[in-house]
Amino acid sequence: MKVIISPDSYKGTLSAVEVAKAMQKGILDVDHSIETIILPVADGGEGTLHSLIASTDGRYCSATVLDPLGRAIQAQYGVLGDQETCVIEMAQASGIMLLQENEKNPELATSYGTGQLIKAALDQGFRKFIIGIGGSATNDAGTGMLQALGVRLLTAEGLELDAGVSNLMQLDVIDMSLLDTRLAEATFTIACDVDNPLIGDRGATAIFGPQKGVQKHQIAEFDRCLKHFADIVEAQFTIRLHDYKGAGGRRGGMGGALIAFLKGTFHAGIDLVLDAVQLQAHLAGAQLVITGEGKSDLQTLHGKAPLGVAKAAKQAHVEVMLLSGGIDRKANTALQAYFTVVESLVDEEIGVQQAMQEPAHFIRLKTKRMIERYLQKGDD
């Protein structure tokens, strides 16, 4: 029997790799002869880098960059097993996870460090990039990243803008003359799990700004700043970012900067990951797939990692089990249309606090029970 183990992370508790290993132990507790293949996945946000490196036998590199508040840190990027594709995860250099709650400052937070990571990879000879742009602490429309790569943002007086989204209102000219020339040889594939535009009611600031520390009274002001930046981009380069799907979202406008200046192309994050880990090929000869995430709800059915795994498995006529930290009861029926079994770590016996304290133990236990039931059903 061959089982593919392809969970996303349980955010706040375990990485996708850790979840997969706990599931593997539960399977082997039932029968050590079961063949297990671990292919942790992600949907373009935090954890994408680790999932891709683990699943493709890739390697990590590191570079000294500036965090969202301009402090020097060591950040990682990855090289896939093909030894030519570089994975940059925005959260590594410009992520909200790098800040304490009282440090969140979307007015000053910059994506400069992400640009430094790209530059470090260019220095190592890489020209093929996958960019995971979820989990950022920034709302600067990717301008910090652009500045790190040589773009000059100038006022009417010819002065360079300082970091800070409000300073974008002073932008008059975008000078590309010093842009790193190696970028002309590079390709950028953007891993994206949402399609929000740059500005407006569904834009970067209105929808995702508050979780980065944007106060209610700042939303309209920051949105005006991003609109002014988009106006300048449209006037100079005839590229309209204002309502471009994916230009906004969780990454504070980074998608728009990658599209306009680095000719990036959007792809559903989970589709990129599934291609990279070659899930379709591994499904050959498999009888079962187990996936999961921290919490499954109706949003799971809109491009999240477990749904991507389920769709791939369905094409290969392989059953899929879902084991998530929590399951929204309202979504249970809808989820059952894609998954043979839908299980929650938290139930009548296991409380939320227990599950949070010992997630690996309970994932192992629940997986063991699921496999036992599956095999028993096969014997009936």
Image: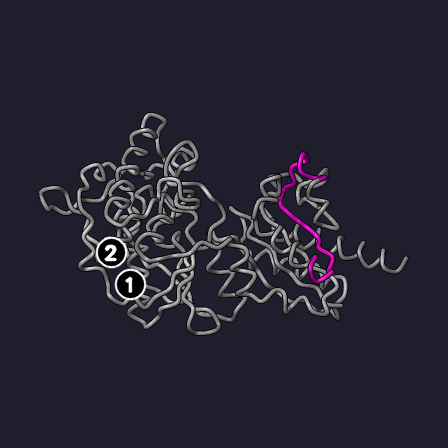
Q: Are marks 1 and 2 in contact (CB under 8 Å)?
A: yes
Q: Which three-letter amino acid code belongs to the residue tagged 2?
A: Ala
Query: At 28% across and 69% down in the image, what residue appears?
Result: 123
Q: Position of residue 92 (x, y in %)?
A: 38, 55
Q: Does the magenta stretch include residue 321?
A: yes
- Which residue is pictured at 27% across the width and 46% down the height? 233
- Residue at which label 1 appears: 119
Place of residue 21 in the rendered image (x, y in percent of width and height, measured from the top left) = 61, 61
Mark 1 residue element: helix
The foreground one among 50 and 203 is 203
Q: Residue 367, relative to residue 186: is it above or below? A: above
**Type of the residue with mark 1:** Lys
Work out how far the residue at label 1 is from the one at label 2, CA to CA, in angstroms.
Answer: 8 Å
Q: Give the side of residue 202 with respect to residue 355, left or right.
A: left
Q: Residue most toward the front?
A: 238
The magenta stretch spans which residues? 314-333
Q: Residue 215, how many percent across, how many down? A: 35, 29
- Residue 148 is tagged as 2
Q: Classify residue 364 by image quadrant.
A: bottom right
Q: Position of residue 145 (x, y in %)?
A: 29, 53
24 left or right, relative to 157: right
How packed is label 2: few (under 14 Cα within 10 Å), some, or many (20 or more)?
A: many
